[in-house]
Amino acid sequence: MGAVLNKFLNLPNNINDYAWQNKGACLNTNVEVFFHDFNERGDSRDERIANAKKICATCPVINECLEHALNVPEHYGVWGGKSEDERRLIRRRRNRQGRKTV
């Protein structure tokens, strides 16, 4: 059942595929830095995203994190130094490029 669910969710089957997460600069950081409260808006949100990105900038697995977030896709939070909106734009750009080459 796990493999079927992972395939449905576009997640790796092998737990070792997540080993990069143990090297993340965010490992012992409060998740609230990376994920917003439902009612968070404006300057407060911008400041939280900027703080999360500062942590990501020091991360040795920033590229793995971003690719994970784009491939799953992770719709919420800061992943791989990119906000939700930034990742949405990257996915759209990749989808358009993929259609052009087909």
Image: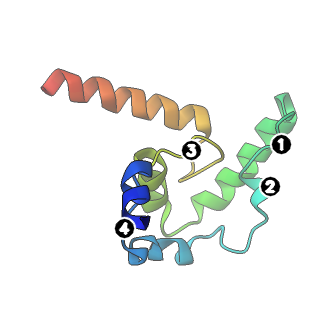
Q: CA distance from mark 4 to mark 1?
A: 30 Å
- Sequence-wise, the earlier of marks 2 and 4 is 4
Residue hosting label 2: 32
Instruction: Report the amino acid beneath label 3.
Output: Lys
Proximity of marks 1 and 2: CB atoms separated by less than 8 Å: yes
Q: CA distance from mark 1 to mark 3?
A: 17 Å
* Res 5 quadrant in image: bottom left
Which numbered mark, 3 or 4, is in the foreground of this view? 4
Q: CA distance from mark 1 to mark 2?
A: 8 Å
Instruction: Report the amino acid beneath label 2.
Output: Glu
- Sequence-wise, the earlier of marks 1 and 3 is 1
Q: Is residue 36 left or right of residue 57?
A: right
Which numbered mark, 2 or 4, is in the foreground of this view? 4
Where in the figure is residue 56, as x and y percent of width and height?
A: 60, 58
- Sequence-wise, the earlier of marks 4 and 1 is 4
Which numbered mark, 2 or 3, is in the foreground of this view? 2
Q: Residue at x 67, y 61 (%)?
A: 55
Q: Residue at x 80, y 37 (%)?
A: 45
Instruction: Report the amino acid beneath label 4.
Output: Asn
Residue toward you, 55 or 33: 33
Q: CA distance from mark 2 to mark 3?
A: 15 Å
As helix, strand or loop, the secondary structure at mark 2 comes to helix
- Sequence-wise, the earlier of marks 2 and 3 is 2
Q: Which mark is residue 37?
A: 1
As helix, strand or loop, the secondary structure at mark 1 comes to loop
* Res 58 quadrant in image: bottom right
Q: Is residue 85 left or right of residue 36?
A: left
Q: Which mark is residue 82?
A: 3
Instruction: Report the amino acid beneath label 1.
Output: Asp
Residue hosting label 4: 13
Residue toward you, 75 or 100: 75
Q: Residue at x 43, y 34 (%)?
A: 90
